[in-house]
Image (spheres, rainbow, N blue to C red):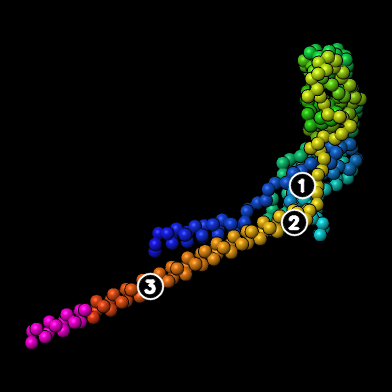
Amino acid sequence: MPSTLRALLCLGLCLSQRISAPKQTLPKPIIRAESTYMVPKEKQATLCCQGSYGAVEYQLHFEGSLFAVERPKPPERINGVKFHIPDMNSRKAGRYSCIYRVGELWSERSDLLDLVVTEMYDTPTLSVHPGPEVTSGEKVTFYCRLDTATSMFLLLKEGRSRDVQRSYGKVQAEFPMGPVTTAHRGSYRCFGSYNNYAWSFPSEPVKLLVTGDIENTSLAPTDPTFPDSWDTCLLTRETGLQKDLALWDHTAQNLLRMGLAFLVLVALVCLLVEDWLSRKRTREQASRASTWEGRRLNKHKDSEE
């Protein structure tokens, strides 16, 4: 077999298998909490699982076990679903993840989302020393106090709820901060934590005002009236352009598969033709050799006579 033809056949077979072989898993989805991951007791929590257009099933897992299933209804093709968790309590607080399915293929598991229940038991008190009004460059310390049995305290800045500071103490914990700048301005609250996912009522807010260094606004906090950007569900419907792109991609893959299949078929036909010609040449050579041998034997007999 010519080396060029052999290489062409191997290339066609390898590409065909590479393209036609489906992926084992789909990309992992994104899981978010709508509005906030801190949900007051007995209120409803909403988790969003953002996957892929064309997904036929979404599963929500809690602490590694199946918790809920959602199936988008056709013909509404959206890139995710919402899971509603009513009557939030300590038994429903913990780590959540989600997966989705397109056809028979499942996605990877999403990252873990910590869902916290608040307004459990008592309310802590929050204070700041030396006071709520300081000059840029000074150091301040927040004090969170809760008389009920807890050992972990948490300090959060409104508008930055993911930036949780933790401290430990029997009835009170300290949160040193500084030297402060205008980026530290804003309202703060604290919680007592009975475990990682069950928090107390929030304290009354304490507003920290930092004067001086007014030109340094690049690190100024976001408006606390808006939720954290990563706590917003951004589910969208499939547009006509997305459908056209998906159809074009599917068509292009089919055409490429057909082209490779044709290439493999041509290579096989060439191999068969080459084999047939080779056998034909072998038979002709054998026939000529037999004829020549017969003539040689006849001449030898004639010379002996």
Instruction: Quickly name the residue at label 2.
Output: 243
Task: Provide the secondary structure element on which disc 2 rests.
Answer: helix
Report whether residue 236 is seen. Answer: yes
110 vs 249: above or below: above
Q: Which quadrant would the N terminus be assigned to in this image?
A: bottom left
282 vs 136: above or below: below
Q: Which residue: 40% across, 70% down? A: 275
As for residue 295 lying within the magenta part, the answer is: yes
Q: Which residue: 86% across, 29% down? A: 223
Task: Provide the secondary structure element on which disc 3 rests.
Answer: helix
Label number found at residue 277: 3
Query: Residue 179, how many percent across, how many down?
Result: 77, 15
Who is closer to the viewer here, 245 or 156?
Answer: 245
Query: Residue 172, how many percent across, how many down?
Result: 83, 20
Instruction: Quickly name the residue at label 1.
Output: 50
Q: Which residue: 82% across, 48% down? A: 82
As for residue 243 lying within the magenta part, the answer is: no
Task: Provide the secondary structure element on which disc 1 rests.
Answer: strand
Query: Residue 95, how many percent across, how many down?
Result: 76, 40
Mark closer to the chain start, 3 or 1: 1
The reply to whether dot 2 and dot 1 touch (C-beta < 8 Å) is: no
Q: Which quadrant would the C terminus be assigned to in this image?
A: bottom left
**Amino acid beneath label 3:** Leu
Q: Which span of residues is magenta-colored?
A: 292-305
